[in-house]
Amino acid sequence: MTSSITDVPGIKVGQVQRIGEGWLSGVTVVLPPPGTIGSVHVGGGGPATHETDALDPTTLVPTVDAVVLTGGSAFGLITAHGAQRWLEEQDRGFRTDAGVVPIVPAAAIFDLGRGGDAKARPTEQMGYDAAAAAGASPDFAPVQRGNAGAGTGAALDYQRYKGGVGSASLRMSGGNSEVVIGAIAVVNAAGAPVGLGREQVLRAAPALPPLPGHAPLNTTLCVVATNAVLDPAQVKRTSSASHAGLARALNPSHTLGDGDVVFGLATGEKQLVQEGPVTPVLELQILAAEAVRLAILNAVASAETVETPAVVLAKHPDLT
């Protein structure tokens, strides 16, 4: 196992990013196998999202064809169109008389201007390329952590440290030992990490002070996936329960300025087995929250130093 979301059979991840010449942003696409049930819980007060209403358990289509996590704030949501275009070319989506309509929910972090140019934000083509990269990825391929994909321009603790992408996975016990729960997180939080030593936080990055006149805006985006058989309502509840892991990893979390979102995916490969008095779905949801916590801390510990204009300005105040 790679201790990542790709330990869940059939789940693939593709990432693209641009760094330099004003850029510090990217896109992460989580590509599940056909027929995967999807849902979402939005817990933050400042979300930038696309197609989340379609993931309500009472709506028409219970399946999801891809989940897009992106930089660029609301502008970056155009990357979902690129992923949709790639999926359409693969003939994947909800079938209608007029052809397939891929169901591609998306959410974005605020990283505008982190590379120096506020208009250097992910494009539709970057969404297409990230989806294609996921499609070309071999089964169980490790996920690139740190400054990759949607986490390229991420920061946390009010921009004191560098954020990024992290991932983790866990297995259920007993007769459900073949059930895997994986999570991927893009950490761009207002909060500081909980549960890491000082040396690990300092490894994550030097200070990233906001540019003068710019208040930091924040978001942590997560996808939790499992190969268990779950219905849409159970996937929805798993997404909701997973926010507990986010709150345990970051303090504060779910603030008015955080657009915290957890997407849930269930591929339906393994039927859960009832062995004791505790329903196996409850154990799965407990592990989902823990996978989210571990993925967030993995993102912080994996982040690398990036020289952003904010850092340059802090080192050379004479440039103002």
Image (tube, grey):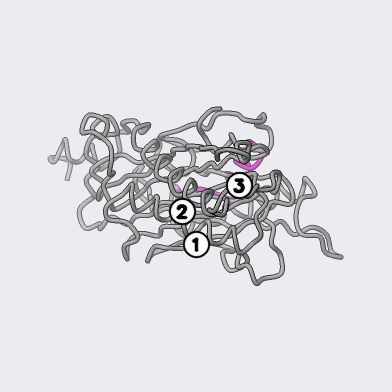
- Across and down, in percent, residue 301 comes to 34, 33
Mark in the foreground, 2 or 1: 2
Whole-Å distance between the Cαs marked 2 and 1?
Answer: 9 Å
Image point (63%, 36%), residue name = 178
How many neighbours does mark 3 have within 10 angstroms: few (below 14), some (14-19), or many (20 or more)? Answer: few
Image point (31%, 31%), residue name = 305
Q: Earlier in the sequence, mark 3 or mark 1?
A: 1
Assign the N terminus to one quadrant of the image.
top right
Whether label 2 touches label 1, CB < 8 Å: yes
Does dot 1 land on a helix, a strand or a loop? strand
Residue under numbered circle 3: 275
Majority secondary structure of magenta residues: helix
- Across and down, in percent, residue 18 comes to 47, 37
Whole-Å distance between the Cαs marked 3 and 2?
Answer: 23 Å
Mark in the foreground, 3 or 2: 3
Whole-Å distance between the Cαs marked 3 and 1?
Answer: 29 Å
Question: In the picture provided, is 130 more to the left or to the right than 169?
Answer: right
Question: In the picture provided, is 265 more to the left or to the right than 73?
Answer: right
Q: Is residue 209 part of the magenta span, yes or no?
A: no
Q: Which residues are magenta?
A: 121-133
Q: Earlier in the sequence, mark 3 or mark 2?
A: 2
At label 1, the amino acid type is: His
At label 3, the amino acid type is: Glu
Residue under numbered circle 1: 41
Whether label 3 touches label 1, CB < 8 Å: no
Q: Nearer the viewer, residue 242 or 60?
A: 242
Residue under numbered circle 2: 242
Residue situated furthest right in the rendering: 97
At label 2, the amino acid type is: Ser
